[in-house]
Image: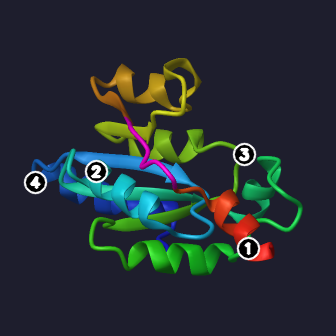
Amino acid sequence: MALTTSEAVGLVNRARDSGQIIVFTNGVFDVLHPGHVRYLRDARALGDLLIVGVNSDRSARALGKAPDRPINPEGERAEVLAALQSVDAVVVFDENTPHAIITAIQPDILVKGADWGENAIVGREVVEARGGRVVRIELAKGYSTTAIISRIRR
């Protein structure tokens, strides 16, 4: 189950008060595969608490993916992510970008896949303004939600 933004902020504040390092990443995470699991494990290894922002169904469609995406509804995607050992909390966001949730959470470390250009990472300025850092993680080769869906359809 996903937390509300205010619940996530409360969790972050308690963790930060005890000296924990807060890590944030985001994505659609439509059809979970080993590439996602490895990425989230690597993100979690950078700190003490990993919060994952998940695009709402509306937000995911706004990204210009196929018209029938996401395959799995936001509540189910959040539930599956929250069940992973590496994920401490999930927050669904409805905006087109995660900027507002990043601003609210104020993570110490913002993580994105290395397929994102450094200057294209939303929230970079928010994290760096408070002394945090942005980390780009190499993606596991051979895993793609789009490719999995295409294979199923064939």
Badge 1: residue crowd in 10 Å (few <14, some 14–19, many ≥20) = few
SS for callout 2: helix
Using the image as rendered, state which of residue 106 and residue 84 is in the foreground.
84
Q: Please give the range of residues in magenta.
A: 137-142
| Badge 4 or badge 2: first in the primary sequence | 4
> Residue, x 39% and y 40% (percent of image)?
111
Cα separation, mark 4 vs mark 2, equals 22 Å
Most distant residue in the front direction: 154
Amino acid at pointer 2: Asp
Do residues under tags 1 and 4 come within 8 Å of each other at their CB atoms?
no
Q: Tell which tag, 1 or 3, sits nearer the viewer.
A: 1
Q: Tell which tag, 4 or 3, sits nearer the viewer.
A: 3
Query: What residue did someone put label 2 on?
Result: 42
* Magenta stretch: includes residue 5: no
Query: What residue did someone put label 4 on?
Result: 18
Amino acid at pointer 4: Ser
SS for callout 4: loop
Query: What residue did someone put label 3 on?
Result: 96
